[in-house]
Image (tube, grey):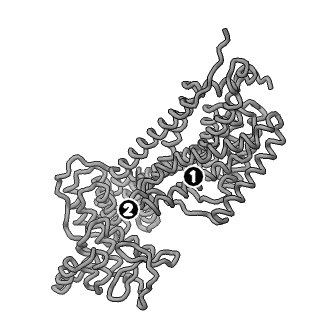
């Protein structure tokens, strides 16, 4: 009795549901980690609230105190009070900020970006870089421009007061991350810091990371202002630092004349130690950047590895499927901003499956209409898919314009995790690496543990035999092409978080994507993983040494030599190709 294998679409549907669940768990975890980067179990510790002695708050008159009282009791939030106040009131507010830490951070950002303005009667406005005026605090766009709109600028005294006021508020926070930010602010203005403030804060600090930063800052102050024994002791403490500014201080001291021999020896040892630590941190950052680049290449190449390995089709429109995923992310973002503004910060969770589905549907349409009639005719297929790529680019230009569109980073992927003074890892690139790991794991599960994956492997290894046992190869071709296109769409969603989104987005990555597939081995997922890591990391390292253009040339030459030596790639596909 003959048994005919039946193809079911339930396996890929279950996989999509599993992917959505894993993505939700991962992004929720990333959001929690972002908010709780440094956790402190003991929140009852008393932290220093002593005032910072700076050149900005030398005025302690009764009028300043009165102005502060008025500011805290007047209408509006702290930023509105600051804008409406005069010089003495603003100075007093900065010395004792009446609002939250977040509002002070917003004030610093508005002033740094030249966005803060004052209108008629002291109203507060925000003017963005596109000359669009918004009311504050509701941030609603308005076309009613005040006749006397004036920008809020700071004198040197107020700017200094703003810096140290921000440090003071953060130093008194019960959150270690904010206290660490306060230490960084003080370190950037070390010449104006009162050492007594640092000593008091260090004595009351319970977070090991913050205390280490305070100790290093105290050592830098002692090195600048102390006597010879104090300077030597401070230099010995600074040998464990990887702060580039510490290295600058040490090299400046070594360049001075008449340096004591014992101090000079300590400075030389410290310089070598700090330089070595900075170099280690720098190369760690380069490798991390290479890994994030490799993750992007891998996401882009996974779909191509499936379609190329299964169908033997060189799909020149694969880059445009990546672009479609990026533009789908842009559309989902705009939808959330227009109809669900309260949920706009979570649009990425909806954009990932949307990018997959849109690109997958378009990919299946391309396979059904363009590629299927041309199976076995490689040159014609290449030219046809190249024509499809041009059509898709022109359609995007007609719909969205030739200029890049803006896809904003979600709040929980903005910023970076500071490993050390010279090593900072952006959250969005960390998320891309984690997201790639999840996608690869799900894809391996699909190919090796599901009926759909079994059919794909059977058709890839021997199409005629697969047909003979009843596998619907035509339907498998379409579904596999849709899967590969959907993976390209998710790559575009990830790329939208780290780069520009424009009609030419796909052309930037299509060559590197083909290189990953060829080097890794046609149809081999693990080969694509290793090839992406090798090309991504080596490309980043080469760019550091010889520049981007020469690095690309050298990398292409190395790939050509590798292919000549091993045409089948890192992993050869097992099986017999009958067609």
Location of residue 498 by image quarter: bottom right
Quarter the N terminus occupies = top right
In the rendered structure, find residue 495 and report the number of the disc placed on it: 1
Residue 189 horizontal/vertical position (percent): 36, 69
Residue that appears at 36% across and 55% down: 238
Q: Among all residues in the image, which is located at the extreme front?
A: 1
Label 1 packing within 10 angstroms: few (<14), some (14-19), many (20+): many
Q: Among all residues in the image, which is located at the extreme top?
A: 1
Helix, strand or loop under label 1: helix
The residue indicated by pointer 2 is 260
Residue that appears at 44% across and 85% down: 145
The answer to whether 51 appears left or right of 323 in the picture is left
Quarter the C terminus occupies = top right
Location of residue 449 by image quarter: top right
Residue that appears at 29% across and 86% down: 87
The answer to whether 377 appears left or right of 238 in the picture is right
């Amino acid at each position: 009795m003959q048994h005919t294998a039946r193809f079911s679409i339930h396996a890929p549907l279950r996989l999509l549901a599993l992917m959505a669940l894993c993505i939700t768990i991962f992004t929720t975890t990333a959001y929690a980690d972002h908010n709780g980067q440094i956790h402190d179990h003991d929140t009852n510790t008393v932290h220093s609230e002593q005032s910072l002695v700076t050149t900005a708050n030398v005025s302690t008159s009764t009028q300043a105190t009165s102005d502060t009282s008025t500011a805290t009791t007047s209408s509006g939030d702290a930023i509105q009070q600051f804008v409406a106040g005069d010089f003495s009131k603003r100075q007093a507010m900065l010395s004792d900020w009446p609002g939250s830490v977040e509002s002070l951070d917003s004030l610093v950002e508005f002033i740094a970006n030249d966005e803060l303005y004052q209108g008629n009667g002291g109203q507060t406005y925000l003017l963005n870089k596109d000359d669009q005026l918004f009311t504050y605090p509701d941030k609603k766009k308005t076309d009613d421009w005040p006749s006397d709109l004036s920008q809020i600028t700071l004198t040197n005294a107020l700017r200094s007061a703003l810096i140290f006021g921000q440090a003071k508020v953060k130093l008194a926070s019960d959150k270690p991350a904010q206290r660490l930010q306060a230490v960084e602010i003080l370190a950037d203005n070390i010449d104006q810091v009162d050492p007594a403030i640092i000593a008091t804060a260090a004595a009351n600090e319970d977070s090991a990371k913050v205390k280490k930063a305070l100790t290093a800052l105290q050592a830098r102050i002692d090195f600048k202002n102390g006597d010879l024994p104090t300077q030597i002791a401070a230099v010995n403490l600074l040998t464990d630092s990887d702060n580039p500014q510490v290295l600058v201080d040490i090299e400046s001291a070594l360049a001075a004349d008449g340096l004591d021999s014992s101090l000079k020896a300590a400075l030389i040892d410290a310089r070598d130690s700090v330089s070595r630590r900075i170099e280690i941190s720098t190369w760690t950052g380069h490798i991390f950047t290479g890994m994030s680049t490799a993750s992007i290449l891998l996401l882009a190449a996974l779909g191509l590895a499936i379609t190329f390995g299964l169908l033997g089709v060189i799909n020149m429109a694969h880059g445009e499927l990546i672009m479609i995923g990026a533009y789908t992310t842009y559309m989902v973002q705009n939808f959330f901003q227009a109809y669900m503004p309260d949920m706009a910060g979570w649009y990425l969770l909806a954009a990932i499956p949307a990018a997959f589905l849109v690109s997958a549907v378009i990919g299946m349409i391309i396979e059904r209409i363009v590629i299927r009639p041309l199976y076995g005719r490689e040159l014609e297929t290449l030219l046809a898919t190249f024509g499809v790529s041009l059509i898709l680019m022109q359609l995007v230009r007609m719909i969205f314009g030739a200029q890049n569109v803006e896809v904003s980073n979600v709040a929980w992927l903005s910023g970076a995790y500071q490993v050390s003074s010279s090593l900072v890892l952006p959250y969005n690139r960390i998320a891309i690496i984690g997201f790639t790991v999840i996608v690869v794991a799900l894809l391996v599960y699909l190919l090796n543990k599901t009926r759909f994956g079994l059919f794909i492997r059977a058709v890839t290894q021997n199409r005629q035999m697969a047909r003979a046992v009843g596998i619907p190869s035509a339907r498998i071709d379409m579904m596999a092409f849709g899967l590969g296109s959907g993976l390209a769409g998710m790559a575009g969603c990830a790329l939208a978080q780290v780069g520009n989104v424009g009609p030419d987005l796909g052309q930037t990555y299509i060559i590197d994507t083909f290189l990953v597939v060829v080097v890794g081995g046609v149809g081999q997922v693990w080969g694509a993983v290793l090839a992406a890591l090798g090309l991504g990391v080596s490309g980043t390292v080469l760019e550091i040494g010889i520049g981007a253009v020469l690095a690309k040339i050298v990398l292409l030459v190395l790939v050509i030599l590798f292919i000549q030596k091993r045409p089948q790639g890192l992993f050869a596909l097992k099986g017999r190709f009958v067609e």
